[in-house]
Image (cartoon, rainbow, N blue to C red):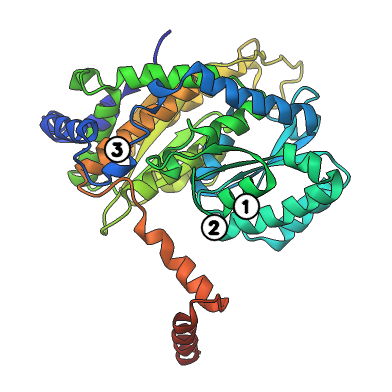
């Protein structure tokens, strides 16, 4: 099968000659540090060879659990936040019918998401909708105490038990958590839930190919074997032994770091011309934002859905501050066909498109946009994806993960921690007077009184 491809020619022209080539020894050192486990964050490198370590037996266990949920549930709610839900949602949204929320699917349950916000309205509306319905829950939390997820799970666990009885609930609630410790592990063992382990050495944003992503994707009815196969092939294609000029992960990391450090491009917009990739971009934003945004460094990751956002953000991208570059995800072949019709009156003036595939119009919009943005001073990288299917999504996931690890090390930060994430939690707990935060509660109340 053909692999995804990377075209950097419309980005390199914004750099001084030899800039990308100069990164080769640095990239090689980063790859060696990843392989040898000598880099910062080396206790979170389990993702690096995760695809090739996945066995058929492991996938069979995931599939068996998914099949049980599919047989017993109309709806399955995935409770998780950040990397504990974005990867699964990215793949499910990309592979689903765009109107599946309207038409439903008699073969598979509808996968819903909770535990990724603290909206009272959302939780009230979700639980109201689930009344009288056969639903299950996949609770994804290493600790079991993440506020957003724990709050949603407590509500859904009680509702599921109330509606379906404790015995049935035990069969349709699944825990994906730590192997030995944490509130979610204690609950799973006590209640007798089927459980899967989040590996200690895989961070949340790199966890799509663990049960965190694989189980919800399988529940939705998609081929996790093909997803993993794509990742396995990309693991080989981006191995440290692959020459620098042929290694798309190495090239992507080098070019974006060159644009950042040498050309002053501080913002990367990931753009697509296929609306099903919206949540893939959300997953990508976390992957790069949480990996690189530290020590007052890091490219800011943003996302646009084209052509939709060309009518809202197009002006800024074309003529705003020249601090941006674009990475375009381009799907080469559609899965469906639709020809543009002719109209006798031709009041809209579009008869010149009659008989053309709608995707041809979309592709010309993509090419025209890339040319316009490059002319407007926006470096442009293009990732070509042959088809939007499970296999190529697996390739995309691993490609971006591998490039992220290399890019973070080129930036000289630890790509695998997230120390800044805890700041808002400490303030929130202090404001809520959580036990154990008495000193922090007093300090923050005094601060707010002074600022009032």
Q: Which mark is residue 307?
A: none
| Position of residue 352 measured from the top left corner of the image (x, y, whole percent) | 61, 16
Q: Are marks 2 and 1 in contact (CB under 8 Å)?
A: yes
Distance from label 3 to label 2 (Cα)?
Answer: 26 Å
Q: Tell me the mark number nearer the camera, choosing from 3 and 2.
A: 2
Residue 93 vs residue 315, the one in the foreground: 93
Q: Which mark is residue 115?
A: 1
Tag 2 residue: 146
Residue 168 vs residue 402, the one in the foreground: 168
Q: Which mark is residue 405?
A: 3
Q: Is residue 406 above or below residue 116?
A: above
Residue 349 vs residue 334, the one in the foreground: 334
Distance from label 3 to label 1 (Cα)?
Answer: 28 Å
Q: Along the horizontal axis of the image, is 306 left or right of 105?
A: left
Q: Along the horizontal axis of the image, is 155 left or right of 262?
A: right
Quadrant housing the N terminus: top left
First in sequence, mark 3 or 1: give its number.
Answer: 1
For the point 51% across and 16% down, the residue is 56
Q: Are marks 3 and 2 in contact (CB under 8 Å)?
A: no
| Position of residue 381 measured from the top left corner of the image (x, y, whole percent) | 34, 30
Q: Tell me the mark number nearer the camera, choosing from 2 and 1.
A: 2
Circle 1: element type: loop
Distance from label 2 to label 1 (Cα)?
Answer: 9 Å
| Position of residue 234 measured from the top left corner of the image (x, y, whole percent) | 37, 20
| Position of residue 211 measured from the top left corner of the image (x, y, whole percent) | 53, 33
For the point 61% across and 15% down, the residue is 335
Q: Is residue 403 above or below residue 237?
A: below
First in sequence, mark 3 or 2: give its number.
Answer: 2
């Amino acid at each position: 099968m053909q692999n995804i491809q990377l075209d950097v020619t419309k980005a390199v022209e914004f750099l001084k000659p030899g800039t990308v080539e100069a990164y080769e020894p640095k990239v090689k050192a980063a790859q060696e540090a990843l392989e040898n486990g000598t880099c910062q964050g080396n206790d979170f490198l389990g993702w690096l060879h995760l695809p090739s370590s996945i066995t058929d037996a492991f996938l069979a266990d995931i599939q068996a659990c998914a099949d049980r949920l599919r047989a017993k549930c109309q709806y399955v709610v995935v409770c998780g936040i950040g990397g504990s839900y974005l990867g699964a949602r990215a793949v499910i949204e990309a592979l689903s019918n765009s109107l599946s929320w309207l038409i439903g699917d008699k073969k598979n349950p509808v996968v819903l998401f909770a535990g990724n916000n603290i909206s009272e309205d959302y939780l009230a509306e979700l639980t109201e909708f689930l009344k009288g319905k056969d639903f299950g829950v996949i609770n994804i939390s290493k600790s079991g105490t993440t506020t957003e997820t724990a709050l949603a799970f407590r509500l859904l666990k009680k509702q599921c038990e109330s509606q379906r009885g404790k015995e049935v609930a035990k069969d349709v609630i699944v825990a994906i958590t730590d192997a030995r410790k944490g509130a979610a592990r204690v609950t799973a063992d006590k209640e007798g839930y089927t459980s899967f382990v989040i590996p200690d050495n895989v961070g949340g944003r790199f966890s799509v190919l663990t049960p965190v992503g694989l189980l919800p994707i399988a529940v939705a009815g998609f081929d996790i074997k093909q997803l993993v196969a794509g990742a396995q092939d990309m693991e080989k294609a981006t191995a440290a032994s692959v020459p620098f000029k042929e290694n798309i992960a190495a090239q992507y990391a080098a070019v974006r770091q060159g644009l950042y450090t040498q050309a002053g491009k501080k913002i990367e917009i990931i753009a697509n011309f296929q609306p099903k990739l919206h949540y893939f971009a959300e997953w990508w934003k976390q992957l790069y934002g949480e990996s690189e945004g530290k020590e007052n460094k890091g490219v800011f990751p943003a996302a646009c859905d084209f052509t939709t956002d060309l009518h809202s953000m197009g002006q800024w991208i074309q003529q705003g501050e020249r601090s941006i570059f674009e990475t375009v995800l381009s799907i080469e072949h559609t899965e469906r066909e639709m020809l543009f019709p002719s109209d006798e009156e031709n009041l809209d003036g579009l008869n010149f498109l009659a008989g053309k595939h709608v995707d041809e119009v979309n592709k010309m919009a993509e090419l025209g946009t890339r040319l316009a943005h490059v002319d407007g001073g926006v470096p442009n990288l293009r990732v070509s994806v042959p088809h939007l299917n499970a296999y190529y999504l697996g390739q995309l996931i691993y490609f971006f993960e591998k490039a992220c690890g290399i890019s973070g090390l080129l930036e000289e930060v630890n790509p695998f921690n997230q120390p800044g994430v805890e700041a808002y939690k400490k303030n929130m707990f202090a404001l809520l007077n959580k036990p154990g935060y008495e000193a922090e509660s007093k300090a923050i109340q005094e601060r707010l009184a002074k600022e009032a």
